[in-house]
Amino acid sequence: MTDTNKSPRLRTVDKVKPPYPVNQFPADFGQKLGKEIVYLLATKSTSSLEGPEWEQIFASCIGAEWKPSNVGLDDVVLNVCAWGAKTVKSPHPHKAKKIRLISGRNSLAYSFDQKNLDADPQNMGDDVLKIWNARVEAVRAKFSHLRTVVLIKSGDLTELAVFETETVLYPPENYVWKRNKNDNLEAYEQDSNIHRFTWQPHGSQFTIVESVPKECLLIKVKPPQKLDKDAVLQALNFDKTWITITNRK
């Protein structure tokens, strides 16, 4: 007799293993990332590290391919796994407990032809999540595993925290949407009343509130001296003939 509660064994993409478990980065990942940051600080005029550059650095550190996409959920690809990469600034990255991830523009006007920004907040919020879910489903159709890798950075990039989270669907029925004092919509979990999302009607910006996991990787970097521009040019044996100047006719 068959056990009706027993799940069948299926040959699905879910059985395909990712390159490594979530937040169990390769052994040399932290060292590689620190090296990239030291190089960045030595060569750039400002201590800045934003989306596309972080995507490239992360891809290099795990041996993946950087493939920037319009959706922003699968900019880094390694075999059956894809990542979206985000940066967040914090005065104390190693102590951060919660962070806000700007996760795209979910336009109700474009996706649902909804132009009334004073409509019922619950209905609007449900539609905001439907847009997110549609994006995630489209990318998950191509990859067995989908993650977001987050870099929490100090202003001078000497203190960093890195963690991953699974990029998942959010069932609209699990959240209650309310307007805040700024007329933005905020979503709270039904069971815990924890704030999870914010959506700005003007601009359609969608923000996810994430808790920083205990497995977060903490990195400190000793700031190097800036490379002297003239010394670098001299080391390259720079010659004026490398530059051609003409006037438009």
Image: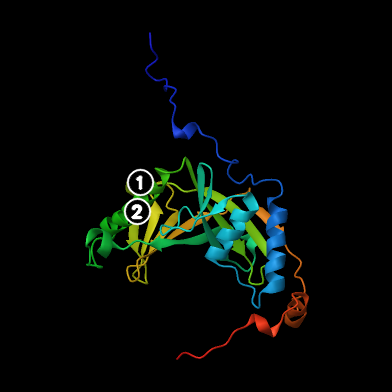
Q: Nearer the viewer, residue 40 or 223?
A: 40
Residue 86 percent coordinates (x, y): 53, 60
Residue 26 percent coordinates (x, y): 67, 46
Q: Looking at the rendering, which quadrant does residue 125 occupy? A: bottom left
- Could you tell me if the residues under marks 2 and 1 are in contact, i.e. CB atoms within 8 Å? yes
Please state if 160 lies on the left or on the right of 127 as rendered: right
**Taking the image as drawn, is residue 135 in sight?**
yes
Q: Nearer the viewer, residue 23 or 42?
A: 42
The residue depicted at 37 percent of the width and 48 percent of the height is 138
- Mark 2, secondary structure of its residue: helix
Spatial CA distance of label 2 from label 1 is 8 Å
Please state if 178 lies on the left or on the right of 140 as rendered: left
- Mark 1, secondary structure of its residue: loop
Amino acid, disc 1: Pro
Q: Nearer the viewer, residue 22 or 11?
A: 11
Q: Which residue is mark 2?
A: 129
Q: Which residue is mark 1?
A: 171
